Amino acid sequence: MGTVGSEFFYDRYNTLIAPLALCSYRSPRRTAATSHQMAVGQRRVLDFQYQVIQLNQLVWRDYLGHPNPLATALMARMRMIPKERWQVKAACFRQLAGLSLTSAQQHMLATFVSIYLPFWP
């Protein structure tokens, strides 16, 4: 029997499962690592590679009008100049209001935007 993370998902959902790191920090802006290795002596015991989505390297305007509610909320952590903060926040709320979401979903995503994009840094 394999590990829960490998066989369970492949067998149950019959789909590719790929590791992903979603980086939502403001800085640093340098590209995040895409792997993690660990060795004991000369023996490599871990070699983990993953796809990175680094929000501070994406431009928020590229996601205006995007139908995905998560992409809309994540605009709050994308690259912007300080004077655009209010514009981005307003765009996020406008987009969320226009999407087909339950009130609970809208509330959760709007709360994310409010927390991660305050008017003052």
Image: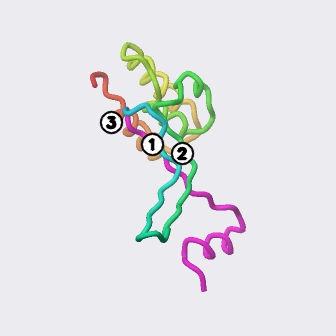
SS class, disc 2: strand
Q: Give the residue at mark 2.
A: 52
- Residue found at the far right of this picture: 14
Residue located at (36% from left, 29% from top): 117
- Are there few (<14), some (14-19), or many (20+) residues within 10 Å of tag 1? some
Relative side of 84 to 69, left or right: left
Q: Amino acid at mark 3?
A: Ile
Amino acid on which disc 1 is placed: Cys
For residue 44, the mark is none
Query: The disc labelled 2 sits on which kind of residue?
Result: Val
* Mark earlier in primary sequence (3, 1): 1
Residue position for label 3: 115
The stretch drawn in magenta includes residue 20: yes
Dot 2: few (<14), some (14–19), or many (≥20) neighbours within 10 Å? some
Q: Give the residue drawn at x 46%, y 28%.
A: 93
Numbered disc in front, either 3 or 2: 2
Q: Which residue is mark 1?
A: 23
Q: Are marks 3 and 2 in contact (CB under 8 Å)?
A: no
Residue 64 position by quadrant? top right
Q: Give the tally of numbered discs.
A: 3
Helix, strand or loop under label 3? helix
Q: Is residue 9 left or right of residue 28?
A: right
Q: Position of residue 8 (x, y in %)?
A: 61, 75
Q: Find the distance from the CA under tag 2 to the CA under tag 1.
A: 7 Å
Q: Which residues are magenta?
A: 1-25
Residue 107, percent across and down? 41, 41
Is 71 one of the magenta-colored residues? Answer: no
Question: Which circle's residue, 3 or 2, is located before the other in the chain?
Answer: 2
